[in-house]
Amino acid sequence: MRTRLLAAVSVTAALAITATACGGSSSGSGSSSKTIKVVYQQQLNNSNKVQANFLAPMVKQFEKDNPGTKVQLVPVTASSNDYYTKLQLMMRSPSTAPDLVYEDTATINSDIASGYLKPLDDYIAKWSDWSQFADASKAAVKSGTDGKTYGVPDNTDTRGIWYNKKIFAKAGIAVPWQPKTWADVLAAAKKIKAADPSITPFNIYTGTAGGEQSTMQGFEMLLYGTKAGGNSLYDSDQKKWVVGSQGFKDALEFIRTVYSEKLGPPVEQALGANIGAAVGTEMIPAGKLAMDIDGSWMPNNWIRNGSKPWAEWESTMATAAMPTQNGQAPGRVSMSGGWAWSVPAKAGNPDLAFKFIEFLETKEASAKWNAENATIAVRKDVATDPAYLKALPTNKFFTELVADTHYRPALPAYTQVSTAIQKAMESVTTGQASVDKAASTYDNDVKTAVGADNTVKGS
């Protein structure tokens, strides 16, 4: 009873929050034919305002170019999982539905399946710039059911290992450093711990509070580097989710090792909702973290207008590709995701919303955004532009990782599978479950979510 009561109170509170955030009223989001409301995420307890700082002048110019129009920016301050929930609550009703929303490509198919998003095919058919978008990025915003397009991607990303060259040098590890196996990564972490116990050797995101950052930057960077490779999570040939794989257990064992041997942040910190912000704005700039599996976007914490300006980052930090488990081909692994602009199905002014998308996604605007947000370009003409490649010293490295990257299964059930992964990670991080037990629980969670007939035993 108490659980149901708390859940009801939480939903009611969330609805109240989202209605307030959207200026909710019976008149709906499209109260004027020349007004749109644009929703995006502001990370919880993170002073990073890169997106807000980019959007503000864009809105000003758009309103100037289109007299009488009004673009209302609605940042939602929340963790990743809470943002997804609040966004869905907003999109359920015409009275609270925004006109434009910033969608994580990991959840877009879930929102499509729920009927929250409007297909954009009629718009993009008339938009010549659509031909400049990379096919892989287009696939990330396409429904796996009806084949229609439900978003316009504005960035992608890749992931690798960030490491502190000064800490490595003090620990006697030669730089540049490129591990060939998981064992090499753990060996470096142990050497750093022995050299200076006050420094956290290694961060790999884990647990449910971290949401998708735990799944992608953490677990999947391991899983897709196991022997099973690309079919480690979903068998695209059989169209079934993989359970019972050794690769899954091996990835969990790596997580267990990191935290049981105290090579990572303290467990209570690692499982906190603020670990992402702490890593980027506190631990790394302060020289308290030696290695971090993270994304191409990390410099947006440290650049001049970032949340933690840090002029020394270019001379202090370096990057290495995440190796495959035993060094097997292709020798490195990365994960790619990204974000997109989507129009809710119940938006009051979809035409003006798409016009604003076109304005945000020109070659010039895209290049500016990708440079300022330290993300990987999705427009082909931007990705090959010398100015983009030189905008940050790490752009070339992370762009080259695209050749060996993996994408999450673009299916509605992915969000449930991702949550099951986070639970399994958390249980081995805390030591509450063995690797075998955590993997078995995951298998059962997946079978419950997708149906046992939609699973296949992995290798």
Image: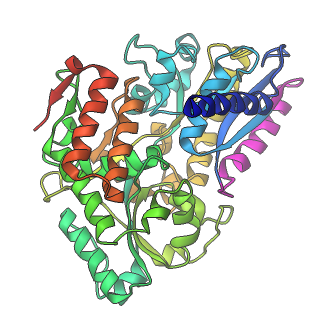
Q: Is residue 138 shown above or below 404?
A: above
31 lies left or right of 269: right
330 lies left or right of 339: left
Task: Give how far across and how far down residue 148 sits, in percent.
Answer: 45, 13
In the foreground, 24 or 429: 429
Residue occupying the far left of the picture: 459
Is residue 61 rendered magenta in the image? yes
Residue occupying the far front of the picture: 1
Q: Can residue 62 be seen in this view?
A: no
Task: Give how far across and how far down residue 136 sits, in percent.
Answer: 37, 32
Is residue 324 rendered magenta in the image? no
The residue that appears at 54% across and 62% down in the rendered structure is: 299
Task: Give how far across and how far down residue 282 sits, in percent.
Answer: 57, 70
Q: Is residue 278 shown above or below 424?
A: below
Q: Please count the marks in the image.
A: 0
40 lies left or right of 172: right
Task: Give how far across and how far down residue 78 sits, in percent.
Answer: 64, 44
In the foreground, 176 or 343: 343
Which image quadrant: the N terminus?
A: top right
- State which quadrant residue 240 falls in: top left
- State which quadrant residue 63 falls in: top right
The residue that appears at 69% across and 53% down in the rendered structure is: 49
The residue that appears at 84% across and 16% down in the rendered structure is: 31
Q: Is residue 36 shown above or below 322?
A: above
- State which quadrant residue 383 falls in: top left
Which image quadrant: the C terminus?
A: top left
Q: Which segment did they paint magenta?
A: 45-71
